[in-house]
Image (spheres, helix red, strand yellow):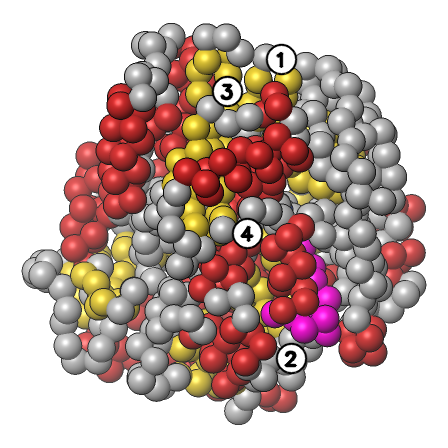
Amino acid sequence: MEVSKETEVSESQIAVHWREEEYYEPPARIREVGNADPTIRERFAEEHYPDCFVEYAEMLTWDKKWDTVLDTSNPPFWRWWVGGKLNACVNCVDRHLEARGDRNAIIWVPEPEADETQEITYAELHRRVNEFAGLLRDFAGVETGDRVTFHLPMVPELPVAMLACARLGVIHSEVFGGFSGTACGQRMADAVSTILVTMDAYYRNGELIDHKAKADEAIEAAREEGTEVEKVLVFRRIPGEYHSNSPMVEGRDFFVDELLAQYAGKEVEPVSMPADGTLFLMYTSGTTGRPKGAQHSIGGYLSYVTGTSKYYQDIHPDDTYWCFADIGWITGHSYIVYGPLGLGTTTVMYEGVPTIARPSRPWRIAEKLGVDIFHTAPTTIRMLRKLGADEPAKYDLHFKTMTTVGEPIEPDVWRWYFHTVGKDEASITDTWWQTENGGFLGSTLPGLEKMKPGSCGPGVLGVYPVIKDEEGNEVPAGSGKAGNICIRNPWPGSFLTIWGDPDRYVQTYYAKYNRDPKSTDWHDWPYFANDGAMQAADGYFRILGRVDDVINVAGHRLGTKELESAATEVDEIAEAAAVPVIDELRGRAVEMYVSLKPGVEASEKVSDKVTKQIEKEIGKIARPKNVWIVADMPKTRSGKIMRRVIASISNFADVGDVTALANPEIVASINEYVRAQKVARGDVPRELSEQELAEIKAFGQVE
Ligand code: 6R9
């Protein structure tokens, strides 16, 4: 059945060499306990759109019900639940107090294993959120509509601060803790945000690292762009101690714990907010220029993450749910904080890295806490497999659903996740979506829909995707052709706009396929996701990566993900990345970067195996010019490989801005190694033209 197929393509399409994978039936357990009932697809069928989403809105508690479900009067700035009023914090905290006040809202696991796990009940969360809201309002002077920036690691103070802002109708903007101070400051300037909430230090990889030092850089970077930071609120990771070399600046920097004493037991009235008000900004990098602040709504967003958490992750209040990701990524906002707390469940947060106390710290956490829903990214799954493919068997793990998000998951990795981690008992939800979307766009319903490794599934409830070619023609399911995946209709979780740049919002996501800029009919405004994909005859989508992620070898367009998937089929390989190198003969050639499983020695034999596997799976055309064996790849906060950085290295170009990397230190060592090897092999590329440089630098932008 697994025949390799290659199809004729036009210039706009990516050649597809993936083979069709076999189906997996939902395991028995999830069919019994699952939330989804078999009529649900019918309830969300297109003839019931947009009212089908009322089901999601009704999961929330409203101060005032909406007048209009979907307002399309100012296209493509869609507004949901217009006229409705609510408070996001009330929905995630207050309304659970009566029934679940003494149940855990958050379980926080610090990185040092000997340190005590913190259990925060809904009552305790309510207390902490109110006190911090009081401090923000009365001490920091923030008002409804202001932007407050957090540069916080994975500590409970982060969701507390988010919910405190939500309570006040203040817009929060969390910058991933691993980003540099400069990256944080630039985002503060973009949002014109004058209050920074940070922490002195946190544990990462076994070390208590200085974090407050980054605040000083942030303030400098914001100042350069014209924004003066007025107050820095500093939490202390270890009560009463200060673990930073950065001096506290009198009148500007304050220890939160010292201020909080005045707010003990304080209750702050939640501000009743319009549904289409703004809950938060989440910055994501664009192909060019400044990071974009995806601006998310209160009512639309909250209803969407609550509804999708229920149906796609099967979260019930009594579950113990662990999303092993960072809150500084959209996944953490939607599926560590707002979705799970909207449903009143227990959400687990872990401070540290998977590789600490190897090989099995994550499995010990899951076993000890009785986690029954697990959620993480392919990069973490690959890392866990690399650390110890047999480890999950040694632990008493019983997941009912397991989510994957962030990248296409290689079928081989999917099968390890399903069989070894899930022990054939858990359903896998592969969820495709983006920062801009608020919540899942493509996935399968656990318990109801068959799974297919490497494919996310069909459009989720109430979301109707389509694949278009460059001219806007529909590429039919089962045609074997790839194109640009679009969503035909608005959905409640979609962002309101790009903060401060509505034109860029229209240009990036809607202009490409809009039929009439004046039309107030949503049918005329397909959302262009900027991802390449193909749809099988069964309606399932296989995401091939960003549209600018394609390597054109002698006119043959190759998707990076399939090259990488072929490489990871080699036993010794843990992770792989494909990038283009300018090639006089073929236009572009493929170059591979691979990292090895532990215990495997780097050797020419391993590189040759990678080359052979790619030739076998894809064809001679894809034969890599070089296979570089490296210790790790440069990655984003969500573990996506920053291909443009290694593409620059391969082409001897400047690596550019690495402030949005989670591990910038890796860049210099890869650069040195690859350059030296290339020089030794006489493989130094000629000077690139401006256009070629631009292509390399934009290659494979992922977020
Ligand atoms: C949630 C998140 C968005 C880009 C997206 C796509 C890739 C995410 C995926 C996936 C294949 C999946 N992506 N999930 N590709 N299968 N299940 O990741 O947001 O960080 O903004 O990235 O990630 O290319 O366009 P974000």
- Would you say residue 350 is visible in this rendering? no
Between disc 3 and disc 1, the foreground one is 3
Query: Is the C-beta separation of discs 3 and 1 under 8 Å?
Result: no
Q: Which residue is mark 1?
A: 555
Residue 353 on the magenta span: no
Residue drawn 76% across and 35% down?
A: 4
Q: Position of residue 571 (x, y in %)?
A: 55, 52
Three-letter amino acid code of the residue under disc 4: Asp
Three-letter amino acid code of the residue under disc 1: Gly
Q: Quadrant of residue 623?
A: top right
- Quadrant observed for ligand 1 in the rendered image: top right
The alpha-carbon separation of the residues under discs 3 and 4 comes to 24 Å
Three-letter amino acid code of the residue under disc 3: Ala
Label 4: element kind? loop
Residue 430 on the magenta span: yes
Between disc 2 and disc 1, the foreground one is 1
Q: Nearer the viewer, residue 272 or 9?
A: 9
Q: Which residue is mark 2?
A: 398
Label 1: element kind? loop
Q: Which residue is mark 3?
A: 589
Q: Position of residue 287 (x, y in %)?
A: 46, 28
